[in-house]
Amino acid sequence: MLRIIYLVNIFVAGFIGFMSVFNAELASIVIYQKTFEPSQVMQLIGSFWIAIAAISFIGLIHPLKYSPILFFQSLYKLTWLVINVLFLKNKIPVALSIVFMAWTILILFYLPWKYLFKESYIK
């Protein structure tokens, strides 16, 4: 299942990342539902998602070894959702928030928790 998650990451995060970097105006409409204006910040976030996609490619080869990136990905998405919705009460794209929440739940369900927190890994 981890390999499927990495594969989806490659295509989805890669698509969103490349669109945000190279066509921020279209990404603003298609991905962000006109909630965010095209900007250099959008391009910066796009670069981050391209990096997630690239690391996920390596994760296809070494799924357990690269599982911390999935934990990081779920943590940043959950943090972003909680802060924006509960504390800042920002308007965020509905589709994006649903995808973030569903993806976070899926990742947290399939993460190899014993591997992530075994003593030899933490040292």
Image: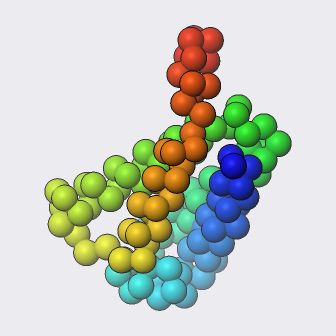
Comparing 95 with 91, the one in front is: 95
Q: How many marks?
A: 0
Residue 51: horizontal and vertical position, in percent? Answer: 64, 53
In the rendered image, the residue lying farthest to the right is 61
Residue 18: horizontal and vertical position, in percent? Answer: 65, 71
State left or right for residue 66 relative to residue 94.
right
State left or right for residue 49 relative to residue 74.
right
Q: What residue is drawn where x is 47% and y is 53%? A: 104
Against 123, residue 57 (above or below) is below
- Asked which colour scheme the image uses, the reply is rainbow
Camera sees residue 14: no
Comparing 24 with 70, the one in front is: 70
Against 1, residue 26 (above or below) is below
Against 78, residue 30 (above or below) is below
Against 114, residue 35 (above or below) is below
Q: What residue is drawn where x is 50% and y is 80%? A: 31
Residue 49: horizontal and vertical position, in percent? Answer: 58, 59
Q: What residue is drawn where x is 54% and y is 30%? A: 113
Residue 38: horizontal and vertical position, in percent? Answer: 45, 80
| Residue 17: quadrant of the picture | bottom right
Image quadrant occupied by the C terminus: top right
Comparing 98 with 90, the one in front is: 98
Q: What residue is drawn where x is 67% and y is 62%? A: 8
State left or right for residue 81 relative to residue 17.
left
Camera sees residue 91: yes
State left or right for residue 36 relative to residue 117.
left
